Amino acid sequence: MKQISIFLPILILAAAACSRPSVSTTGSTPEVEARVSRLLSQMTLAEKIGQMNQISVGGSVSDYAEAVRNGQVGSILNEVDPEKINAFQRLAVEESRLGIPLLVGRDVIHGFHTVFPIPLGLASTFDPALVEKGARIAALEATAQGVRWTFSPMLDIARDPRWGRIAEGSGEDTFLDARMGEAMVRGYQGEVLDTTSMAACIKHFVGYGAAEGGRDYNSTFLTERQLRNVYLPPFEAAVKAGAMTLMTSFNDNDGVPSTGNAFVLDEVLRREWGFDGLVVTDWNSMGEMIVHGFGTDRKDVAEKAVKAGVDMDMMTYGFVSHLEELVRSGAVREADVDRAVRNILRVKVLLGLFEHPYVDVEAAKAVQYAPAHLEAARTAAQESAVLLANDGTLPLREGLRILVTGPLADAPHDQLGTWAFDGEKNHTITPLAALRDRFPGQVTYVPGLRYSREHRDRFDDVTAAARRSDVVLAFLGEEAILSGEAHSLADLNLKGSQSDLLAALHSTGKPVVAVVMAGRPLTVERDLPHCNALLYSFHPGTMGGPALADLLSGDVNPSGKTPVTFLRTVGQAPLYYNHNRTGRPYNRETMLDDIGLEAGQTSLGNTSYYLDYGAYPLFPFGYGLSYTEFTYSDIALDKEIYGPEETLDISLTLRNTGSRDGTEVVQVYVRDLVGSVTRPVRELKHFERVPLKAGESRPLRIRIPVRELAFWGLDGTWKVEPGDFQLWVAGDSASGEPVSFKVN
Ligand code: NOJ
């Protein structure tokens, strides 16, 4: 194996002195920088450009051997077989001139082998510590097999559930998204960097979730203020948490594709935030700039991308094909190439890849699906399920005859959700299996529908079985393939004949519990009258079955809250809780059926709402029921007027007034009443999970620094503007009474 130590110390010092970033967001040190410089000084231009090339590998290692040996590849993705990864690393480390190891990337999005709930489900836990633990487990499993870089977390704010990729993020709220993103970064990379550290890749930078009409890959038109106030903060938080890499997005924002957007990549990311990690494109997003009509050919877009601040090209082959020529002609400065290579080598050095390029294939097996991993996945699935409706049918009483039905009751592949490449369905425990285990001898299973899109006219077999049972559990939703990348939908009702199945079950007069597994908030309003309880579990992952059995049986009390607004009908999209206040805020006025014949123009209310659906969603952001009840009282602030550097000190009493132990997600929302620009009607500023025993009452103190109320105002600066504010402490974004305070 070639050793780095052969390089000349004199070069190290010279190069290090001119390259070290003043403060490193990735945790780089002068020693790391010196090592990077030493290496860089040994590289030919072609070798440098090779580092900037990432390729997807499939098939046999020998197909790529020559390119790796010649130093034309800096990173590979989509190989997870540890033997093959070792073989790739051997080519790079032992057979290439400089022995630089490969960075091995993979989409490890919500678990590697042990699959956790989809990220939208993880967000509904409002439990960053648990999410961090899940990411750590994903890193332990993936790094054991040689994967040292995951393309996660996805930090795209998504306010439109038609967008299939809403499944991959934390929903509609900036604050929640930021907390989840930081947690994932910490989990993937670990407290200290070692061989179990998997570099996080925050994506997609930026605005991708605002795709017009929820159609994937579509254009966005976000103003700088929207970017600064809503879309950028989660990325900044993740950079501060030490995220080592970032991925550009597919969309063009106001006409500029992200992969060629120097404003966001250079000005904001590098200069303002000081990011010294690696910027990779999304898959062929450099090449897609030609399709966008933003560049003439691959050479042109390669130039635009590197100049905008891209370091590594995923799958366009733009840099390896044209960068050398661009540098030789003077169109691109070699300094730009050096910058990119430095960012790449820094990550490789920090990850310890030079010292530990190989994995122990046998040891890797023991790590996968470890009991502690499965247990954490089960807890995550328990916490991620949101109880949306319940007339007391849940939790199930003991001794009932239970009919289990529906296309998701026994769908081990589909309950894993989108982006679960490495999850294996033979390790998944379905609700059917778990319920049979929890209620031995009490469960009858009649699927009703084989998959979510199936159409059927009659359900005689299921309704007959329902009549012979005491309660019906209907597992409905979406197959995994209906959400995720490139899976946008224009209609968000349950697909196929699922609503008919539910209605048929309801017509038997038996209590019906609907459990919905989906990648997005579906529009379930029409189904609510046909079920006595509705538990929304998103796609819950490997241990979804046992977790749902725990919740349905009452062994565990539901505590998830909606991380996104649930619409009544798709026509309301986009509808999100933290919208700006309009000049004509809704107050319930004339609805469609209230309109008289030949009504005059002025009779219709003149506020912001739909005549047919009003202004409100089905369920607001932050909403979720429990088998117990919580009350909030004595909510008070320590002062009436705060300085901008002070801290709000909020006190309250939270009571569990029911007869079961439970956990409440306490949420704090703030509204800035008058600003230099209009401000959201509410914004989440704090949340915490509070477990309380039945009947227990607990005083809580919550502290929020006033600087957290800052925003990007009319003068283009980030600050807290003095004035009047309101604050709510409540169990969701639509509840509570406001408390007033001032900032001077
Ligand atoms: C395209 C997706 O947009 C991105 O999220 C993913 O990480 C890459 N493909 C690599 O698979």
Image (cartoon, rainbow, N blue to C red):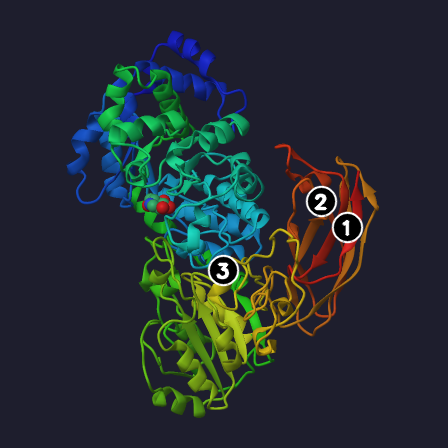
User: Disc 2 and disc 3: Cα gap in Å?
Assistant: 32 Å
According to the picture, the residue beneath numbered tag 2 turns out to be: 704
Amino acid type shown at disc 1: Ile
User: Label 3: how many residues lie within 10 Å, few (<14), some (14-19) or many (20+)?
Assistant: some
Amino acid type, residue under disc 3 in the picture: Ala
Whether 565 is drawn above or below 657: the answer is above
Q: Secondary structure beneath disc 3?
A: loop
Quick check: marks 2 and 3 in contact, CB under 8 Å? Answer: no
- Confirm whether residue 330 shows in the render: yes
> What distance separates the C-alpha of mark 1 from that of mark 2?
8 Å
Mark positioned earlier in the residue sequence (1 or 2):
1
Quadrant containing the N terminus is top left
Q: Position of residue 449 (x, y in %)?
A: 34, 78
User: Looking at this rendering, what residue extends furthest in the top direction?
Assistant: 10
- Residue type at the position of mark 2: Ile
Q: Quadrant of residue 55?
A: top left
**Disc marking residue 650:** 1
Which of the two discs, 1 and 3, labels the residue nearer the N terminus?
Answer: 3
Q: Residue at x 56, y 51 (%)?
A: 173
Tell me the tag on residue 573. 3
* Some atom of ligand 1 lies within 8 Å of the CB belonging to the residue at label 3: no
Residue 315 x %, y %: 27, 38
In this rendering, is residue 468 above or below 714? below
Query: Is there CB contact under 8 Å for labels 1 and 2?
Result: yes
Q: Nearer the viewer, mark 1 or mark 3?
A: 3
Circle 2 or circle 3, nearest the eye: 3
Alpha carbon distance from label 1 to label 3: 34 Å
Q: Is residue 81 above or below residue 308?
A: below
For marks 2 and 3, the one nearer the N-term is: 3
- Where is residue 188 drawn, in percent x and y? 46, 42
